[in-house]
């Protein structure tokens, strides 16, 4: 399995619409990437300490080929373009292998 973490770093002037994120963006991610091997997409909302995050999304894929298929999908630009609808934060993307 491969995990893609998308984090939204906290800052004093950032906006983040949790309702839109959970009711529209995460379902969009699921609809676009599940057919390509996404196992789950889970949103977490830690307390945004000065160096924390407003949100973290954990996307677990079946493997590297599933992740690459998702990133190369012609529908992925719609997922990326949707970010402006819920936040002013530039997301940070991290990836790792689950053990």
Image (cartoon, rainbow, N blue to C red):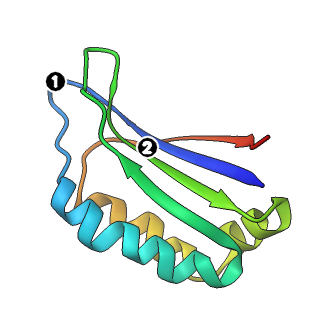
Q: Position of residue 59 (x, y in %)?
A: 57, 56
Q: Residues within 10 Å of mark 1 (few under 14, many from 20)?
A: few
Q: Position of residue 96 (x, y in %)?
A: 72, 40
Height in image: 54 above or below 5? above
Image quadrant assignment for residue 14 = top left
Identify which residue is drawn at 39% across, 67% down.
26
Residue 25 percent across, percent down from the top left: 34, 68
For the N terminus, the quadrant is bottom right
Using a 10 Å C-alpha cutoff, classify the residue at mark 2 as few (fewer than 14 neighbours), some (14 to 19) or many (20 or more).
some
Task: Look at mark 2 in the image and give the residue it sits on.
Answer: 91
Q: Nearer the viewer, residue 66 or 78?
A: 66
Name, please, the residue furthest toward the front.
Answer: 99
Which residue, as the protein is rendered here, is positioned at the far top?
50
Q: Is residue 15 left or right of residue 42?
A: left
Quadrant of the rendered structure where residue 13 is? top left
The residue at 23%/58% (across/down) is 86
Q: Quadrant of residue 72?
A: bottom right
Left or right: residue 76 versus residue 63 is: left
In the rendering, at what x and y percent does residue 73 appear?
66, 78
Q: Which mark is residue 12?
A: 1
- Is 69 left or right of 60, judged from the image as shown? right
Q: Tag 2's secondary structure? A: loop
Under tag 1, what secondary structure?
loop
Nearer the N terminus, badge 1 or badge 2?
A: 1
Alpha carbon separation for disc pair 1 and 2: 16 Å
Looking at this view, name the residue that lies furthest to the right: 65
Locate the C terminus and report the quarter of the image it occupies.
top right
Q: Residue at x 81, y 61 (%)?
A: 63
């Amino acid at each position: 399995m491969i995990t893609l973490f998308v984090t939204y770093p906290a800052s004093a002037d950032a906006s983040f619409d949790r309702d839109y994120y959970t009711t529209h963006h995460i379902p969009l991610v699921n609809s676009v990437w599940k057919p390509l091997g996404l196992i789950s997409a889970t949103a977490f909302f830690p307390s945004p300490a000065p160096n924390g995050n407003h949100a973290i999304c954990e996307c677990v894929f079946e493997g590297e080929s599933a992740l690459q298929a998702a990133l190369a999908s012609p529908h992925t630009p719609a997922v990326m373009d949707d970010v402006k609808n819920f936040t002013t934060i530039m997301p940070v993307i991290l990836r790792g292998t689950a053990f």
